[in-house]
Image (tube, rainbow, N blue to C red):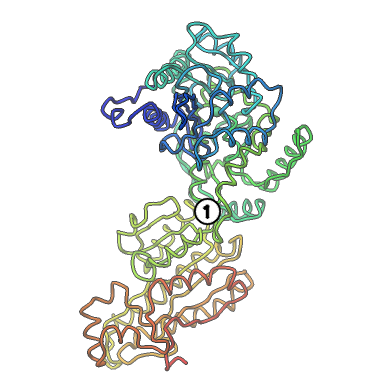
Amino acid sequence: MKSLWNDAEAATFGGPLGARVYTSRLLGRDKSLVLHGGGNTSVKIEETTLFGEREDVLYVKGSGWDLETIEPAGFAPVKLDYVRRLASLPSLSDPQMVNELATHTLRAGAPAPSVETILHALLPHAYVDHTHADAVLSVSNSPDGDKRVRDIYGDRVVVIPYIMPGFDLAAYCAREFPRQKTKNTVGMVLLSHGVFSFAAGARESYELMIELVSMAEKYLAARKAWSVGLPPQAASPFRREEAARLRSDASRAAGFPMLCRCNDAPHFLGFARHPEVSRISQGGPATPDHVIRTKPRPMLGRNVEDFALQYKEYFSVNAKKAKQSKTMLDPAPRMALDPDFGLAAFGRTAKEVGIVEDLYEHTVEVILRAEALGGWRALPDRDTFDVEYWDLEQAKLRAAGNPPPFAGEIAIVTGAASGIGRACVEALFKRGAAVVGLDRNPAIESLWKRPDFLGLVCDLTQEKEITTKIDQTVKHFGGVDMLVLNAGIFPASQAVQDIGADLWARAMAVNVQANLMVMQACHALLKLAPRGGRIVVIGSKNVPAPGPGAGAYSASKAAMNQLARVSALEWGKDGIRINSIHPNAVYDTALWTDELLASRASAYGLTVEQYKKNNLLKTEVSSKDVAELAAEMCGPLFAKTTAAQVPVDGGNERVV
Ligand SMILES: [Zn+2]
């Protein structure tokens, strides 16, 4: 492991807190040190109060901040002397600790200080760095881990047995640290948890962390326990219905819809097919704080019911031993190891799914390395349980707030790169859905750069392409709950006697048959949607009120409208509802250039402004208006409605 310190970069961060921000980010950049909010850092700074008195302030990482992206505002300043004294108390409950830290924080609006604040306070050095380094965990979670740690570091580190983070750990360290400390001490290893380094300067403390972790890496390498690649695996053909069923089962057990990503990358597939997977995967997490994201262990295979039963058993056994009474969290898995899918990761948001994948990717390495040292030794369930059900850990999850209405659900929008389709994607994001945008335009792939979006180039008239893209959708997000059928073409105006066969066929292929093929490909998936499948058809005012010159367009839209009605008849029993929206005169799309608008307006003897609002309500209809209704039709407001046709046209005399 190499130091990432860079003088020029460091110079852009001023003062002792700036240096703390910089080296915290360096730690955060290396995923084998900390992941997703893991680890914490601090600095002790002497400051002057408004009364001119000197005061020691501990700036410690605030809860909810990630080391990689932390800012000065991410550190909570607390009164050092007071917090240090807390460690000498015989006991301190969690609510008391939270209260004492909050009432001794020196900046209004600062984040809640880390649950490790007291421990940071009692270490005497100015800079303190704490990580959950993979290499150190591999060594400490193997047979005779504590002896190995002492062999590697001698008296350079203080070794602390596993104790749950928080007051108990701090109080233990307050007694044990001075006892073990020598003039050579530069760090502290918390067995089955992580490692600390400390020094007078930011760079020194950071580089000591790199040095300590490198020593563990070298130790592993010398014992052929560093490179632990698994034999290459041939991926299984992806069966999307089976994946959607797994996600559906997990969502049912959770009591809410979850996304699910199947990742058959070589390390996951290799691990899922490892001959000893049932032993090595079932121990527990690499470091305790993973448990709030991953649950104590992955499900093996796909039997969610069995997993839920085992989880309930784990809860009832360990809850009895807990100090306070506990309420069981949902018993659904957050990870499954399957010989075909590799790792299936579950979560209410795409971000959560990504976190689970990242945590387990590192866990696999930690486990395999510990195995190479003689055997993976996880913490007992009881310790894992205490962290999983620790209120201060659950508070981190609660900080995310109430989930939006479509959290954990997946929507496909066709023709998503522009106009109404693009607005539909935004409207669905706003309600918390993960969205797959299909479009012929390659821009779709990079239109939104966010984990809850997947943009796929697709010619919807090609059945094979549809199949491939729906497979990708299910592999990436776990299923299809909502379908917004928006893609369509408006062929050049032609009188009926002049409509060419090609133009007619093209209108039917895109406006009707493509939708039919997408619906057919998604039917089995919509049936498995945890809250029932929903389809919204973006129709047209031309269905109830066709226009001259638009024969092919109007006929194709009417055909689609009829297909939607028949689908409502046939698929109602599958819990799938299908409704249509008939927009008219939506001018904020690529179709309508300023020139075209001006020429159409003048043809009617109207100004552009009058032309845009030429409806009963004298209002302009935007893509967003249509999209909001489309999204709303997928939501609870329309839960009892199917086969409806709703105009979004400002009121049209011919439709009324
Ligand atoms: Zn920790």
Q: Determine the quadrant in which ligand 1 lies.
A: top right
Pick the front one: 178 or 619: 178
Q: Tell me residue 645's x, y (percent).
A: 51, 82
Q: Quadrant of residue 307?
A: top right
Pick the front one: 496 or 346: 346
Judging from the image, what secondary structure is the residue with disc 1 in?
A: loop
Q: Quadrant of the N terminus?
A: top left
Q: Is residue 520 left or right of residue 421?
A: right
Residue ID at (49%, 28%)? 365
Residue matched to label 1 = 478
Q: Is residue 403 left or right of residue 462?
A: right
Residue ID at (49%, 72%)? 536
Q: Tell me residue 253's x, y (percent).
A: 67, 51
Examine the rendered structure and indicate whether residue 641 appears above or below residue 336. Answer: below
Q: Is residue 583 left or right of residue 590?
A: right
**Which amino acid type is marked by label 1?**
Gly
For disc 1, does the CB lie below 8 Å from ligand 1?
Answer: no
Most distant residue in the right direction: 320
Pick the front one: 506 or 547: 547
Residue ID at (50%, 81%)? 646
Most distant residue in the front direction: 51
Q: Tell me residue 486's x, y (percent).
A: 41, 72
Q: Quadrant of residue 641?
A: bottom right
Q: Tell me residue 206's x, y (percent).
A: 41, 22
Q: Residues within 10 Å of mark 1 (few under 14, many from 20)?
A: many
